[in-house]
Image (cartoon, grey):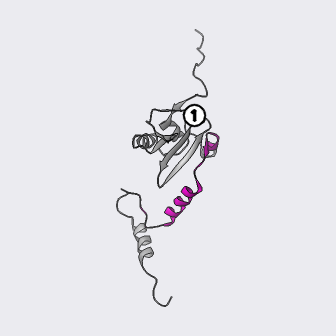
Amino acid sequence: MSPVPPTADPQPTAVRIDKWLWAVRLYKTRSIAAEACRCGQVRIDDKPVKASRDVRPGDLITARTGPITKTVRVRAVLEDRVGAAKVPEYLEDLTPPEELQRLKEASLNPAWRPPGAGRPTKRERRLLEAFLTPPPEGS
């Protein structure tokens, strides 16, 4: 019996949005990407989408990731996660500079903690204390 050649298209024309968001590293896991879709944090052309919505090249995606909202245009679709160096081949980052500035400001503020992160660690408590304590008189 002769081997059957694979019929799968090597480059898919469309893929689920949760899978694509995970593959291009906008979200750490596919389940987090699906949850973001369920909560309305992911939009295609300003319309909220379900995790099963297909993504095609040319789609404009807006996704809330942490403290900022990223805007990207799909260049190509893929199903498997790629290395960070290859991500620009699959998306065009259109995130406004103001959003990136907001991310820098949030990372510089030691008092900022993500909601639901639990109690501060010992290091975080020390940073908070140093931040909130006024400098000594005469310095």
Q: Residue furthest bottom?
A: 138
Could you tell me which quadrant the N terminus lies in?
A: top right
State which quadrant residue 73 falls in. top right
Give the percent coordinates (x, y) of residue 109. Answer: 48, 67
Q: Is residue 10 left or right of residue 54?
A: right
Q: Which residues are magenta?
A: 86-115
Above or below: residue 86 compared with residue 68: above
- Residue at horizontal 56 percent and vertical 60 percent from the top: 101
> Neighbour class for label 1 at 10 Å: few (<14), some, many (≥20)?
many
Q: Amino acid at mark 1?
A: Leu
Magenta stretch: includes residue 24: no
Residue 83 is situated, as x and y percent measured from the top left of the image, at: 59, 43
Q: Secondary structure at mark 1?
A: loop
Picture quadrant where residue 104 is located:
bottom right
Query: Residue placed at 46% from the left, 83% from the top?
Result: 135
Judge by depth and name the residue closer to the eye, 28 or 111: 111
Instruction: Give the percent coordinates (x, y) of residue 132.
Output: 42, 75
Q: Taking 19 as reference, is 112 above or below it?
A: below
Find residue 24 and report its horizontal and vertical position in percent. 56, 42
How many badges with numbers are in the image? 1
Residue shown at the point (52%, 64%) measured from the top left: 105
Query: Which residue sits furthest front?
Result: 46
Compared with 32, 131 (above or below) is below
**Closer to the camera, 21 or 84?**
21
Which residue was labeled with disc 1? Answer: 78
Please tell me whether residue 96 belongs to the stretch shown in magenta: yes
Quadrant of the rendered image containing residue 60:
top right
**What residue appears at the point 41 percent right and 74 percent down from the top-left corner?**
129
Can you say whether 21 is above or below 12 in the image? below
